[in-house]
Image (cartoon, rainbow, N blue to C red):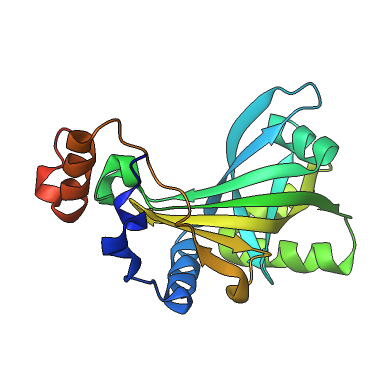
Amino acid sequence: MARHPMTDSTASSSVPDLAQVYAEVVRFREGFATLLMATVAPDGEPDASYAAYIEDDGDFHVFVSELSVHTKNLLESGRVSVLFIEEEASAGHLFARRRLTYRCRAEELARGSIGCETILDRFELRFGALIVTLRGLQDFHLVRLRPLSARYVSGFAKAFAIDDVQLAEIRHLRDQGHRASNAVTRNTFNRRLTNPAEESDV
């Protein structure tokens, strides 16, 4: 069975510096003011959406309205996947956009609590006067998205798992690669990984 080039012996000597990868993850995430969310309803109906967020001590916080499907899903299921993904215009290849995905647990912070008001103050600082108005609307809820695990993909064959979202738990996923149907396909893919000029018909 053919393996992805990063799992071949020719690539095994290239061990990524996990501390550098983690620093890259942090820089990448800090470039976003909004996040993409995938939520699910109790009946299994999926929903994709986005929200502005505030990060605090590794947790993401979103201030969302009951009028949005994702709010009901967050409050009822407590499950959400969060995605940060590179802009298409800046990607080296659209099949390998840089992306960071989190599996999170969603928890509402009670209005009036110190934790809630502190985060909403930070929302005001970051997003302006609109938040003052939204804070007066009772259908808005502050929800904390607490990461359980994460995965960072920086390109072809460059995937990293972040268990417990701690630096000590980051690892390069090299145990399984893409499977090519034949040697010609495999060799073509290997060549394009190292020579982007040949990627036009990937």
Residue 196 or 38: which is nearer the viewer?
A: 196
Residue 30 as seen in the image, left or right of residue 7: right
- Please provide percent x and percent y for residue 152: 48, 57
Residue 18 as seen in the image, left or right of residue 135: left
Residue in the picture at 79% in, 46% down: 141
**Considering the image in quadrants, where does the N terminus appear?**
top left
Residue 7 as seen in the image, left or right of residue 35: left
Residue in the picture at 29% in, 52% down: 5
Above or below: residue 8 compared with residue 167: above
- Please provide percent x and percent y for residue 3: 35, 46
Residue in the picture at 56% in, 68% down: 170
Above or below: residue 174 compared with residue 74: below
Above or below: residue 40 compared with residue 3: above
* Residue occupying the far left of the picture: 197
- Please provide percent x and percent y for residue 81: 64, 44
Residue in the picture at 44% in, 71% down: 21
Residue 193 or 43: which is nearer the viewer?
A: 193
**Considering the image in quadrants, where does the C terminus appear?**
top left
* Residue occupying the far front of the picture: 1
Q: Is residue 152 visible?
A: yes
Q: Is residue 139 visible?
A: no
Residue 19 as seen in the image, left or right of residue 66: left
- Please provide percent x and percent y for residue 26: 50, 69
> For the image shown, how many numbered marks are present on the structure?
0
Residue 59 or 95: which is nearer the viewer?
A: 95
